[in-house]
Amino acid sequence: MELPITLVTILICSVTIANGANILALLNIPSPSIHLWNSVHLTALAERGHNVTVLSTRALKEPVPNHTDIVLEGIYEFLEQQEDYVMEDMSDMSPYTLLALFTGWMKGFCQFSMENKGMKTLMNYPDDFKFDLIIFEPTSGECLLAVVKKFGSPPVVAVSSFSHPHWLNEYIANPNHPAYTPHLFLTYTDHMTFFERLHNVIFYLYTNYMWHIKTLPEIDEIVKRYLGPAGAVPTEELRKISMMFVNTHPSFDYPRPLLPSFIEIAGIHIKEPQPLPKDLQVFLDEAKEGVIYFSLGSNVRSDKLQEDKRRALLEAFAQLPYKVLLKWESDTLPGQPKNVKVGKWLPQKDILAHPNVRLFITHSGLLSTQEAIYRGVPIVGIPFFADQQTNIHKAVMHGVGLKLAYKHITRETVLKAIRTVLDNPSYAKNMQELSVKFRDQIDNPLQRFIFWCEYVIRHKGAHHLRSAAMDLAWYQYLLIDVIVTLVAAILIPILLLCYCCRRMFSRKQPHMKIKKN
């Protein structure tokens, strides 16, 4: 008796999974929150039986079977040298300056990685050692694709913790039209005015210049300088990416066309809430009037705020009838009000799941914003850098939060923002509705990620998903050659006809005789 075809397929896939693949992850963004985000899907792959090696900025707190960490030690100290930019300067920085700073960091991270002991450890692996898949974090980790050649050029997939920077589209030729897809660093919607569309196009062109003409070629040169013939050329490897995973969902992000190799995985890091530490559980349970949770994420330290901003926040909190749970990285908080509880590191996803949490004051990082959406908690956003301005702008557009600019923080502005959101039930209602849309997915994002990673391995790169647009020159992709040909086909006959008519008309004109006196 023959087995059903579907059962045979399942058995074949199970054998492939049971054998386990060798997977290498390349992650050099120095951000604890992004590291935790990536660790969710990487440990899930290890739990599936795959052998996962991770070159990243820190090791897992607790060892996981089939998971090996190689640490790029010292990269956080490198980032701290840029600390002056992370606070006041970046909160009010123009998108042009921000992009220049961002690309500068990217080159700095590349050189740091090439010089690091962790990279040397990876490059010293035996020459016959092969990986079946390489995962890298774009918008910083392009440089690390230099190791692809070392390990036999396996398939490569990209996993972006950011929402959807437009340059990611170009890596796999995903359609990206500037008429309705605003740049990540611009706070426009998908319904732009003429001047907004004009500015969007100009900034797209400027980004392409900064990214493709300046930054990526310099990264190639850094790799050649350190690895020579042993390293692959990153810009060449970018054109071979098999799949792009992005941290987006159409409920919050603007709808746009996506290729089959462009997979959305927003919410991949959110799990069922875990039990809270006893002191936090008691604090939240007893706050019948409600709790405001305050955290500026893993890169912006609350204890490094300017003195006047810190004092304004605390004075505002002291006047509220709510309890406040504050992420504070130092041992003591001068002037701490009685209704404020502090913690150096707090289980944010689990705190937001508590029914007494009524408001989240956040830096508007994408991961924090998604966690608030998933749990249905309205927000007040204090954005500082990268995509945070865009995230809070979207939240305001959806009616689920308000923006509070860092430079405008005073006791009065803090109280006004908090009371506006908490006293108007529409913010909570809109966030609950957005939460339902965000949760309503055909499958679990983590399961989706694992399936497609294993799909790429099974089909040796899944080249059948590769868009033919990757093989076109820019003028072919934009149909410039076709447009020129069509225009020429129309204009040339018209010009010839005009020329002939002019010649015929000039011949028929009688010659005027000049009389002599």
Image: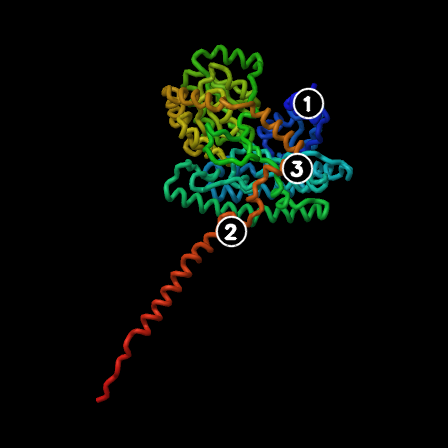
Badge 2 or badge 1: first in the primary sequence = 1
Residue at 70 percent across and 42 percent down: it is: 149
Residue at x-position 56% and y-position 17%:
272
> Which residue matches tag 1?
11
Give the alpha-carbon distance from disc 3 to disc 2, as whole Å: 28 Å
- Label 2: state its secondary structure: helix
Dot 3 or dot 2: first in sequence order is: 3
Work out whether mark 1 precedes mark 3 in sequence or the reverse, and give the earlier one.
1
Residue 7 or 361: which is nearer the viewer?
7
Where residue 144 appears, as percent x and y from the top left, is 65, 40
Q: Residues within 10 Å of mark 2 (few under 14, many from 20)?
A: few
User: Which disc is residue 155 wearing?
Assistant: 3
Query: Quadrant where the N terminus lies?
Result: top right
Q: Position of residue 46 (x, y in %)?
A: 68, 25
Q: Is residue 61 left or right of residue 250?
A: right
Question: Where does the C terminus fall, quadrant-wise?
Answer: bottom left
Check the image and report above or below for 272 versus 312: above
CB within 8 Å, label 2 to label 1: no
Please tell me whether mark 2 or mark 1 is closer to you in this view.
1
> Is residue 336 something that shows in the picture?
no
Please, what secondary structure does the residue beneath circle 1 have? Answer: helix
Q: Nearer the viewer, residue 135 or 331?
A: 135
Q: Residue 487's image quarter?
A: bottom left
Residue positioned most to the front = 1
Nearer to us: label 1 or label 3? 1
**Which amino acid lies under the numbered mark 2 shown in the image of this protein?**
Tyr
Q: Position of residue 117 (x, y in %)?
A: 71, 37
Identified by mark 3, the residue type is Pro
Residue receiving disc 2:
475
